[in-house]
Image (spheres, rainbow, N blue to C red):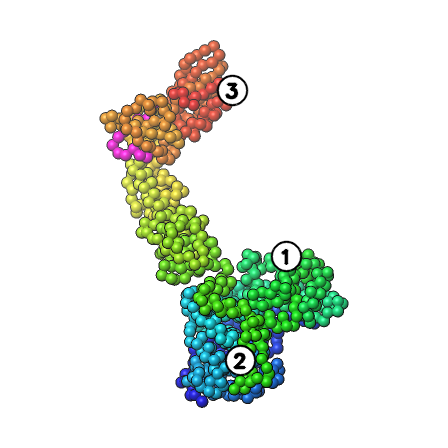
């Protein structure tokens, strides 16, 4: 017997079963505690109902099944004897003792003896009713890897068949699966190739992984639990599906789902529990009615039911893009009958007695699935109630059910019970086995030729990540993104600084627009710039919350920066226009009095035009505007005025202003300036002034600034009826609208009408429009127009 390697912690994934403790998962339910729901009229159990505790407080445990905590030697022998009365008992006893001595004092992460793990693996294989040689390989699967025992030692003690299985398992164990897709695909290929010689290697490895997942809670590092769960979801669960072992696949998926998406797992499990409580009476009634109706047809049927597992529900939600509340089919019934003919008879009975769901019928008996799965699927409503849940019904024979649960293990064939190998084990007919599983040979062939391996792995991985895509940097780093993500999302997923300096992207070497939607496998090169463009409108192309939030923040930051600069320019110009000094300290104190935290927020508010420069000046110089108003005279057309006397941007320093006497421009009207030939003054015109065509000087773009204290003299011709008091009436109207009259005289007097030429002061074009509307609405006024004839 080989000596045990000197180690107390093997570093394997997980420990054996142990009693529940605070903060850890409780033990899975004991042997025989089924997850099946209604059978013979009993109440369906909720997912995970048979277990208690959680990895973290508040989370329900994953729904797992298991055998005894540690199977004793005679118990293992009896498990196998139950389905193989002619087993070689000495073989199992010898393998049990050999493994026990080989592992010696080795411990697992939980502190339990390491030997408890291979015994549990052997028990799982026995529950799958595999041959004694495979069960023995389960007992011995780690001795070469974790002790000084060699493959030659195993061959000498147990023969070449068991040594070959252990050798295949050892080779797989020594190759750690890498995180990158291509490396994992390569290992996936080696994994399948290992099964090419004997598929039982794969069966033992799946049982090994299943026990490790059942005890994963003993791993203390969360990142290691995540890695193992992800590896299981991406590699081992798909392998179980490929070889048709639903029992392994479902449990591996649910356990992985529990660790990878705990919040989703918790929400779905709790939702299932609520739904079960609401529908349990309907489930019991349907099971009883099914049994009665099928019995009337003379068919001996076994009927069971269960609600679907959490991961199965989540996957359906992703595929159909539905919320949990929108799901209608969380129950599945199984009708197991003696013959294929009975399957079709049972379908007829069901379709005659229950309301069917259109498009939900599949006949996998006449057309089996690629992994040889055979069954008939249909769906009915649980009851006639409005909003009733939908129930899936699977009809199959006992052999079909066994094959669905155990997959390839259910089809293992013996050549001859009397034919024994030199070790005493039963020889297996590989040729017969592979004839039944030609699809597995095609899978192995694809691996041998190297074709489609990476794609097979990616397909398996994306089964879990249907709502995600995986893209790559030019150096091969994998970036996970939601479906519909753009290069902008990719840039921010790399790093915030990269997203902030993003200026474009090449996808698979081709420059693509920001709206481009990335696909699985795209290689994305982010282009960066120190002067990155303003991300205006980019949020419409982003789908990740982090990218959207950062883009909004950037826009706010850039807007605040621009507003700050603009506000400072507006304030300085305002102070200059009012001929008062600009003092940052004085403005900072004024900002506090105005309710701002400091100078910066005030300048940003001015830049957003939320606060006027005049309001700030009033706060800094409270008496200034009263003095200016008292001293300010209305601007008369044709007279030279100082640029400081009016609020116009774009005039610069040094030149005086003259307002055109013809068009008499007002604030809010579009204006332009014409510099005089001697450059001593600038004449301000309305943009539609008829005199502009005669001007020869340089034209200057001008724009008004708001100054509520300024006023401008306009001239209006008012045609009135010759009635007593008409002139007084016009004066009253102008006074009512606060338009101070500067001049009024009568011209063009006729028998019935007279023209009054009136000059009065207004603040801006809107003020003038209000006055003109009032004049034209008077019964004494026939017409009113600005004097230059531009209406």
Q: Which residue is mark 3?
A: 779
Disc on res. 134: 2
Left or right, 564 with respect to 80, comes to left
Q: Nearer the viewer, mark 3 or mark 2?
A: 2
Q: Nearer the viewer, mark 1 or mark 2?
A: 2
**Of 127 and 647, which appears nearest the observer?**
127
Disc on res. 359: 1
Q: Residue 196 in the image: x percent, y percent?
A: 49, 73
**Of 355 and 402, which appears nearest the observer?**
402
Position of 12 relative to 561 (above/below): below
Give the residues in magenta.
Answer: 649-661
Magenta segment: does it hold 655?
yes
**Of 538 and 164, which appears nearest the observer?**
164
Q: Secondary structure at mark 3?
A: loop
The residue lying at 40 percent from left, 59 percent from top is: 472
Q: Dots 1 and 2: beta carbons under 8 Å?
A: no
Mark 1 or mark 2: whose residue is earlier in sequence = 2
Label 3: how many residues lie within 10 Å, few (<14), some (14-19) or many (20+)? few
């Amino acid at each position: 017997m080989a000596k045990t390697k000197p180690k107390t912690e093997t570093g394997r994934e997980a420990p054996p079963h142990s009693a529940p403790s605070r903060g850890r998962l409780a033990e899975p339910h004991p042997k025989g505690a089924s997850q099946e729901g209604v059978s013979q009229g009993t109440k369906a159990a909720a997912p995970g109902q048979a277990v208690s505790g959680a990895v973290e407080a508040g989370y329900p445990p994953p729904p797992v099944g298991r055998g005894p905590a540690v199977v004793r030697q005679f118990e293992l022998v009896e498990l196998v004897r139950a389905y193989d009365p002619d087993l070689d008992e000495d073989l199992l006893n010898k393998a049990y003792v050999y493994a026990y001595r080989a592992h010696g004092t080795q411990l697992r992460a939980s502190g339990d003896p390491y030997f408890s793990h291979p015994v549990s693996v052997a028990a799982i294989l026995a529950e799958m009713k595999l041959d004694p040689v495979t069960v023995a390989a389960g007992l011995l699967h780690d001795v070469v890897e974790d002790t000084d025992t060699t493959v030659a030692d195993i061959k000498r003690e147990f023969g070449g068949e068991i040594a070959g299985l252990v050798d295949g398992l050892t080779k797989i164990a020594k190759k750690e699966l890498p995180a990158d897709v291509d490396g994992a695909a390569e290992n996936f290929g080696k994994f399948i190739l290992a099964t090419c010689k004997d598929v039982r290697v794969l069966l033992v490895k799946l049982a090994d992984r299943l026990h490790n997942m059942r005890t994963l809670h003993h791993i203390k590092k969360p990142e290691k639990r995540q890695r193992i769960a992800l590896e299981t979801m991406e590699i081992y669960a798909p392998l179980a599906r490929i070889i048709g072992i639903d029992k392994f696949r479902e449990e591996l998926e649910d356990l992985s789902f529990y660790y990878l998406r705990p919040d989703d797992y918790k929400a779905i499990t709790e939702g299932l529990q609520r739904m079960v409580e609401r529908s349990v009476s309907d489930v019991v009634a349907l099971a009883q009615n099914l049994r009665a109706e099928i019995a009337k047809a003379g068919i001996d049927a076994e009927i069971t039911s269960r609600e679907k597992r959490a991961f199965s529900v989540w996957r359906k939600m992703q595929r159909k893009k539905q919320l949990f509340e929108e799901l209608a089919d969380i129950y599945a019934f199984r009708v197991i009958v003696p013959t294929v003919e009975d399957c079709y008879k049972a379908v007829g009975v069901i379709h005659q007695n229950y309301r069917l769901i259109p498009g939900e019928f599949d006949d996998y008996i006449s057309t089996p699935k690629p992994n040889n799965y055979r069954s008939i699927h249909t769906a009915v409503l649980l009851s006639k109630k409005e909003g009733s849940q939908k129930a899936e019904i699977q009809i199959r024979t006992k052999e079909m059910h066994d094959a669905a649960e155990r997959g390839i293990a259910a089809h293992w064939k013996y050549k001859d019970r009397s034919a024994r190998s030199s070790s005493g084990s039963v020889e297996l007919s590989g040729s017969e086995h592979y004839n039944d599983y030609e699809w597995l040979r095609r899978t192995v062939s694809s691996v041998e030729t190297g074709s489609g391996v990476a794609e097979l792995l990616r397909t398996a991985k994306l089964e879990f990540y249907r709502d995600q895509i995986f893209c790559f940097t030019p150096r091969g780093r994998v970036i996970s993104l939601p479906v519909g993500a753009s290069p902008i999302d990719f840039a921010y997923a790399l790093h915030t600084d990269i997203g902030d300096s993003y200026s474009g992207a090449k996808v698979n070497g081709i420059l693509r627009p920001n709206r481009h939607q990335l696909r699985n496998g795209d290689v994305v090169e982010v282009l960066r710039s120190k002067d990155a463009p303003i991300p205006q409108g980019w949020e419409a192309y982003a789908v990740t919350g982090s990218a959207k939030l950062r883009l909004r923040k950037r826009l706010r930051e850039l807007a605040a920066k621009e507003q700050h600069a603009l506000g400072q320019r507006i304030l300085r110009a305002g102070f200059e226009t009012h001929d008062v000094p600009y003092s940052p300290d004085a403005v900072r104190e004024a900002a506090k009095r105005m309710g701002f935290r400091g100078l910066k927020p005030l300048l940003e508010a001015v830049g957003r035009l939320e606060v006027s420069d005049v309001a700030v000046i009033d706060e800094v110089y409270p008496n200034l505007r009263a003095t200016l108003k008292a001293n300010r005279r209305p601007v008369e057309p044709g007279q030279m005025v100082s640029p400081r006397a009016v609020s116009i941007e774009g005039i610069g320093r040094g030149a005086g202003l003259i307002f055109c006497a013809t068009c008499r421009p007002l604030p809010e009207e579009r204006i332009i300036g014409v510099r005089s030939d001697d450059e001593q003054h600038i004449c301000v015109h309305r943009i539609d002034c008829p005199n502009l065509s005669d001007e020869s000087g340089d034209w200057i773009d001008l724009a008004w600034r708001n100054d509520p204290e300024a006023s401008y003299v306009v001239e209006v011709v008012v045609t009135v009826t010759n009635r007593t008091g008409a002139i007084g009436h016009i004066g009253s109207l102008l006074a009512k609208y606060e338009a101070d009259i500067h001049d009024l005289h009568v011209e063009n007097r006729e028998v019935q009408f007279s023209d009054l030429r009136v000059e009065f002061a207004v603040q801006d074009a809107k003020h003038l429009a209000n006055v003109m509307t009032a004049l034209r609405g008077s019964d004494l006024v026939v017409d009113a127009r600005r004097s230059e004839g531009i209406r």
